[in-house]
Structures are given as C-alpha cells and as structure tokens.
Image (cartoon, rainbow, N blue to C red):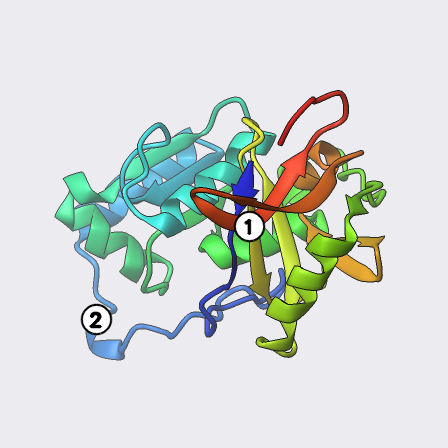
C-alpha cells in the first residue's frame, strides 16, 4: 500500500486538559439558549456518560473533524451516544451556546465538555482521554520500524520543504495507512528508524510493530509503501 506525504493544515487548537476551551469564545450576543433546548441537552448528558455532538453518525460522519473524533472513540469504546446536529438546527446552535464552544464536533464525558477533534486526538495520544474514560493507560512502547534508504531519502526531501514539521504515521483498524507532515505533539509515540523519527498515536503504534517503509514507483505514481510482518508484497 502506498501513501502520499503532505503537510497538515495549521492553526487548529491543541490545548491540553485543564485548558480545554481554547476555541474562540462565542460573542456575548450569542450566549442565550432557549430553555427547552437547554433541557434537551441536559437530559442527553444525564442519560449518557459519553455524548458526541457531531455532523453525521458514527457509521457515516459527514465532516472530517467528526470522522477524526469517531475514529478515536471507536478505538476505545464499543458504544457511545452520538447526536447528529445536521438533523436538528436547534441542537446545532444550542450546543454551541451551552458550553460556549463555537464548533462541531463536541465531546462530553460525564456531563463535562472535553472539546473538539484536535483536543480529543491530543488527549488520546497523551493518555488523558483514556484516563477520563476510566480506561487503562495506553502502551507507549515505540514499535520497531524499518525504513529503507530510498524511503528515508524521499522523506528527508519532503521534510526539508516543510521545516519544523514531524513525520506522522496513522494506521487504521483495516491497516489503511497515511503519512502526514505536521507539528510534533507532546503525547506522540516516536519510533526511530534510519535516522528519522516516526510519530504515532497509541493504536497506530501497536499496528506498526515490525512494519517496513519503502519507496516504490508504479504506473500509478511513486510513493511510500508499507509492508507488514509476514506479508509478501506492499
């Protein structure tokens, strides 16, 4: 399998727990919320310990940030409650006012606002999300990874064009992998190979054990390729 190497968008919030509300606050004129809408949100938070207000559903997220948040929660929880704000304009606007948080998705645990996609991903990487959910801390042992000289050369060339960025590798449950150039996170698990640091989240680190990263050229184009232990091809 091949994957392109590209920088992530910048400017998103990456606050840690204890300073969670780092998105721009709503203006004072937008802070009123209809009593019936507040009551509905209160009821949802009382009925369900983990609630994600999102665009779309867990099975079919309808925005990238909602998809990123469900990907994290799916790694940790067999079940959690979601609310599709696209189907209810009152809730879509009301939840923003409820916690003074202007963007969707929003994750609540035990009635407390945790934050949006970036905060959820950072807390997951650091182990703070697992702690908030009452789960064991993640295994933070860096995986053994092999990077060929050809792949290392290509990676270094990409990183030279994006100074200050780190190489991130994310591997999903289906082994679908993606490389990104993005700022290093304080909670990243870092594996060293061929003079390069590969930054991973806890689940990706487990799936990356023993992988080989190579550079391949095909009729479809050139790119980084992953092979897993025991596989016979890319």
Q: Taking 105 as reference, is 14 above or below it?
A: below
* Dot 2 alpha-carbon crowd within 10 angstroms: few under 14, some 14 to 19, many 20 or more: few
Image point (77%, 59%), residue name: 197
Is 8 in front, or is 148? Answer: 148
Question: In the picture provided, is 93 more to the left or to the right than 114?
Answer: left
- Where residue 200 appears, as percent x and y from the top left, is 69, 49
Question: In the picture provided, is 103 more to the left or to the right than 125?
Answer: left
- Which element type, helix, strand or loop, lies under badge 2? helix
Q: Taking 31 as reference, is 116 above or below it?
A: above
Image point (31%, 32%), residue name: 60
Question: In the picture provided, is 56 more to the left or to the right than 222?
Answer: left
- According to the image, label 2 marks what residue? 30
- According to the image, label 1 marks what residue? 223
- Where residue 182 appears, as percent x and y from the top left, is 58, 65
Image point (62%, 60%), residue name: 17
- Where residue 69 appears, as percent x and y from the top left, is 46, 44
Looking at the rendered image, the disc whose residue lies closer to the viewer, 2 or 1, is 1
Q: Report the Cα–Cα distance between label 2 and label 1.
A: 47 Å
| Mark sitting earlier along the chain (2/1) | 2
Q: Taking 35 as reference, is 76 above or below it?
A: above
* The label number, if any, that marks residue 172 in the structure image: none
Quarter in which the N terminus is drawn: top right
Q: Is residue 185 visible?
A: no
Image point (21%, 56%), residue name: 93
- Where residue 143 appears, as percent x and y from the top left, is 82, 41
Q: Is residue 45 visible?
A: yes
Question: Residue 141 appears in which quarter of the rendering?
Answer: top right
Is 163 in front, or is 154? Answer: 154
- Which element type, helix, strand or loop, lies under badge 1? strand
* Dot 1 alpha-carbon crowd within 10 angstroms: few under 14, some 14 to 19, many 20 or more: some
């Amino acid at each position: 399998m091949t994957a392109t190497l590209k920088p992530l968008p910048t400017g998103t919030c990456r606050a840690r727990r204890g300073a969670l509300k780092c998105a721009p606050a709503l203006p004072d004129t937008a802070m009123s919320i209809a009593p019936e809408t507040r009551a509905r949100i209160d009821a949802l938070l009382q009925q369900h310990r983990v609630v994600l207000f999102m665009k779309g559903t867990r099975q079919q997220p309808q925005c990238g940030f909602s998809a990123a948040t469900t990907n994290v929660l799916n790694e940790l929880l067999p079940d959690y409650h979601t609310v599709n704000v696209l189907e209810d304009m009152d809730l879509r606007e009301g939840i923003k006012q409820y916690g003074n948080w202007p963007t969707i998705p929003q994750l609540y645990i035990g009635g407390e606002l945790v934050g949006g996609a970036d905060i959820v991903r950072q807390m997951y990487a650091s182990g703070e999300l697992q702690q908030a959910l009452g789960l064991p801390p993640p295994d933070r042992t860096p995986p053994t990874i092999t990077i060929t000289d050809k792949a290392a050369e290509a990676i270094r060339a990409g990183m030279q064009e994006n100074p200050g960025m780190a190489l991130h590798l994310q591997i999903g449950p289906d082994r679908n992998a993606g490389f990104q150039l993005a700022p290093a996170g304080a909670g990243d698990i870092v594996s060293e190979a061929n003079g390069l640091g590969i930054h991973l989240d806890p689940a990706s680190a487990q799936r990356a054990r023993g992988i080989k990263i190579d550079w391949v050229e095909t009729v479809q184009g050139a790119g980084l390729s992953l092979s897993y232990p025991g596989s016979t091809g890319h």
